[in-house]
Image: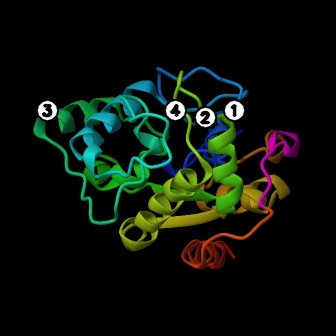
Amino acid sequence: MTPGRNCVVVGCGRSGTSLAAGLLAQAGYNVGDRLLEPDAGSPRGHFEDGEVNRLNEELLAPYAERAPRAGYSRPLRDGERWLAAFPLDVAVESRPELTKAMAAVVPASPFCLKDPRFCHTLAAWRGLLGDPLFVCVFRHPLATARSIARDVRYGDLAVDLDAALAVWASAYARVLARHARDGDWLFVHYEQLLDGIGVRRLGERLGAALDSAFAQRSLSRASADGAVPDALAAMYQELCATAA
């Protein structure tokens, strides 16, 4: 495998971002030194640096009260804010001490940074990243929401389906309305990673040799059957059109 251009993977949790980052890690990308351990939801790993996650949590903490609480069994705690559905008018800003720490955790090139919280915090990181390819990975909102509602547990925390759909909508509304206006972006559907088309497109844009065999359909367990609210359906269609 041959690594190429730096990359930042963006997308709602449980949408295929770990698969994309895993493809790049296998190809020799630097994904960080303090990786989260695999778990039942991501048995081959999350490919996220725990210190990047911690800093993103600190960036989001001042805005925690802006996120809706309906549909959660209890308030979100530190480490859980990737499950928050922040309103689009929340503009996450850094502080000098945080920016210094953020700069220190950007890996050596070629790097791949991945954290679902980037959907909300990316603007605060922009000046530290150079000119990477931003890769937005998505899947049908019901598939993502069902995976969140079924698999995501932090002790006594449970998230119902409606709240999980709101998490999906919050993440991609910000990507489409704010982040994707600046920089070089590639949108990839989870299914495109599984069928190889997305792996080829990703490799071409990065100038990297990627092994499509890493993508295993057997790990996809959530169904996309059913209807979603019109606003989510329209957003999903916009994402699909961008990935065509």
Q: In front here: 106 or 216? A: 216
| Amino acid, disc 3 | Glu
Q: Nearer the viewer, mark 3 or mark 2?
A: 2
Mark 2 crowd level (few <14, some 14–19, many ≥20, 10 Å Cα): some
Mark 3 crowd level (few <14, some 14–19, many ≥20, 10 Å Cα): few
Residue at image coords 30%, 53%: 126
Contact between marks 2 and 1 (CB within 8 A): the answer is: yes
| Amino acid, disc 4 | Glu
Main secondary structure of the magenta stretch: loop
Q: Position of residue 192 (x, y in %)?
A: 76, 61
Q: Which residue is mark 4?
A: 48
Mark 4 crowd level (few <14, some 14–19, many ≥20, 10 Å Cα): many
Q: Which residue is mark 3?
A: 97
Q: Is residue 71 left or right of residue 14?
A: left
| Amino acid, disc 2 | Val
Residue at image coords 65%, 72%: 243
Q: Residue furthest right?
A: 218
Query: Can residue 220 be found in the magenta stretch?
Result: yes
Mark-to-mark CA distance, 2 and 4: 16 Å
- Quadrant of the frame with the N terminus: top right
Q: Using the rendered view, name the quadrant where residue 178 is placed.
A: bottom left
Q: Which residue is mark 1?
A: 41
Q: In front here: 15 or 129? A: 15
4 or 1: tag closer to the N-terminus: 1
| Amino acid, disc 1 | Gly
Q: Is 67 drawn above or below residue 80 in the view shown?
A: below
Q: Which residue is mark 2?
A: 152
Q: Secondary structure at mark 4?
A: loop
Can residue 2 be seen at all in this image of the molecule? no
Q: Nearer the viewer, mark 4 or mark 1?
A: 1
